[in-house]
Image (spheres, rainbow, N blue to C red):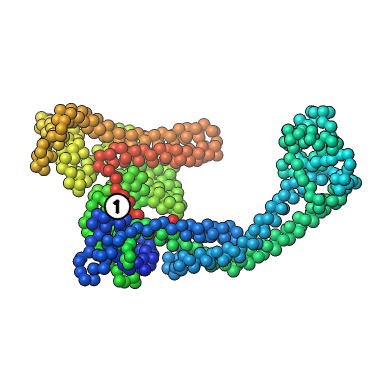
Amino acid sequence: MSIEKMTMMNIVGDIDSLDNVLKDLLKTRKVDLVSAASQIEKSNFLFDVSYKNVDLLVDLNDIRSFEKSEECQEMFQKGKKLEAVLNLEFEVEKIDENIKLASKDELNDELESICSEVSEPSRRIEALKKEQEYLDNFHTNSFNEMEGFPIKVEDLRNMDYFDFKMGIFTKENIHKVKKNYENILAVILHTGSSSEGEVYFVFYPNKLELEISRILRSLNFKEIFLPKAYAGTPNEIKDNIESQKEKLNFEINQQQRIIDEIKEKYSDRIKTIMEQVWISSKLDDIKEKVAFSSHFFYISGWVSVSDKDEVKKALEGNDPLIIKYEHEENAESPTKLKNNWFFRPFEWLVNLYGTPGYNEIDPTPFVGISYMLLFGIMFGDLGQGFVMVIAGYFLSKKMELFGGLISRIGLASMLFGLLYGAVFGIETLIPALWMKPFENINDILMVAIFVGVSALLVAYIYAIINAYKRRDIEEGVFGKEGIAGVILYITMLVIVGGSMLGLSIIPVPVLVGIAVIALSAIIFRLPLTHMIEGKRPLHGDDISGYYVESIFSLVETFLGMLSGTISFIRVGAFALTHVGLFLAFETIGHMMGSTVGNVIVLIIGNIFILGLEGLIVFIQGMRLQYYELFSRYYRGDGREFNPVRLGK
């Protein structure tokens, strides 16, 4: 339950073994690579001057970075084309990390060979389907209304004084034709239908060709050009079309059989090739962070101290390698959280706000305990909590951390359901082990305040420790979230709490004196810090502005302490709301006048409470964490440890 210690690992090896080294690093999933060129530029990539390192040191004068290659992208496109044509599916998550890589030229040549073999039957099928689609769209039903028509199409083509056009009108445009039919010197016959509209024959004197063409264009007439091969009566043409479609289907099936044979022959090989292309592409991506010279490569990356030996062992087969670890930790170190199975899902809440800085305390355990406590108080119900546990279990199959989070707050809800004696809102099935919120309103509100004060005090302690880790005396000792701030807050609690309870453990004048000292420390925090650190001048350039700002910040400090404490009253209020909502549904159920109706209303009520109120309470818990607690001690400005790996 901490942030793992990190170390910078620098690797140098022969340029010819680079791909194997990177592949082994990908398999470990333990190394977060950074730019080796930038490390060399910052002089963070140093090796002992010795005889065996002479060539290495000389080559450092010729450092370059890899340029992005387009070869893998081109092979991906070929692979996608083959997957589409052959109906294959390539799953990145199931890549064999131990696969032996061929050269890119070999992979590309093999893909090109398969593509050329697939190309002709694929092109032929596409052309045949287009021809089939053309027949389906325009000709299949075009002659339905002319069944039994005795005149042959070739006779119509050979008319001396008349001509004809065949085409499609939309319903809207044929309506216009009918309205103006008496003004059109043509005979318009409905012959059938198509996917785009109704099919018509238009007969007109050939001397009126230009006029009729103009009119038809204005009506968006889409002409169908009948090939000369279409001869005979409409019935004969229909039979001819059906015969053509059968031939097309037969040829498509023949070409598809060729495709299926190619699939059976190459499917496994294509998947293997695409796995290698994926790995090569991944290697190309991470090579952008690798530097190289004429003979050597240079790799830099963060690795946790606990994983050093495992990474080193994974690279043993790539000798000779020079591996050096820099143990100097700095703010650039990535953050790798280390929590047990129970608290790990709460990393989702923490990372949603921001990744902890390397020199911050991991707040995950505190977030886990406090969030479960807050949620349990607000949403205590044994039955509804059990539903959340089950829902979280199934959610974790797809979203591991979020599902685990839901299960854990469901457990908290079940625990407080036992304490409240509530099962699916019903408070008469089991006895309350602690109290019933609706019958102890003042008590539940006081518990909420107590939990809030306790959480705030822990937040102050975290803030002081984080400031110490940053060596920040100003904020850690004299800041409003530092030692001075927590003393002021405790003093205020004792004064207000003592007056409300009628207790006087410490005399009020003493408490006031302590508060004044804490306030003074907050006001004079900058000069006091500079005095301790031996810095001069004690103030900045604008002394008056500093003190005006400090005095006004005291108002913000008092308001923050007051509002932060009172804000936790809503925890008790939501506990009461949870009971009140169910009572409302229970009342509606009794009004139904039947047992079945009552049960249905109670089921609907539980679904509503689980869905809507559960979401509201979930968000409210997040709000208390982020705005009342995180704002006092947590920055979340770190960089998440992101090891290189295969797959998505």
Q: Residues within 10 Å of mark 1 (few under 14, many from 20)?
A: many
User: Which residue appears at 11% of the width and 43% of the height?
Assistant: 533
Name the spot of residue 584 as percent of width and height, x first.
Answer: 45, 32
Q: Is residue 586 above or below residue 231?
A: above
Choose top left, top right, bottom left or bottom right for residue 425: top left
Looking at the image, residue 289 sits to the left or right of residue 127; the answer is left
Q: Which quadrant is home to the N terminus?
A: bottom left
Q: Is residue 565 above or below residue 634?
A: above
Question: Regarding mark 1 in the picture, which secondary structure is present there?
Answer: loop
Viewer-closest of 216 and 611: 216
Residue type beneath disc 1 = Thr
User: Which residue appears at 28% of the width and 39% of the height?
Assistant: 631
Looking at the image, residue 192 sits to the left or right of residue 59; the answer is right
Viewer-closest of 547 and 205: 205
Name the spot of residue 31 as percent of width and height, x first.
Answer: 33, 59
Q: Residue furthest right?
A: 150
Name the spot of residue 165 as percent of width and height, x first.
Answer: 80, 41
User: Which residue appears at 34% of the width and 38% of the height?
Assistant: 623
Q: Which quadrant is home to the C terminus?
A: bottom left
Looking at the image, residue 239 sits to the left or right of residue 361; the answer is right
Question: Can residue 485 be seen in this snapshot?
Answer: yes
Name the spot of residue 61 as percent of width and height, x first.
Answer: 27, 61
Report the residue marked by disc 1: 335
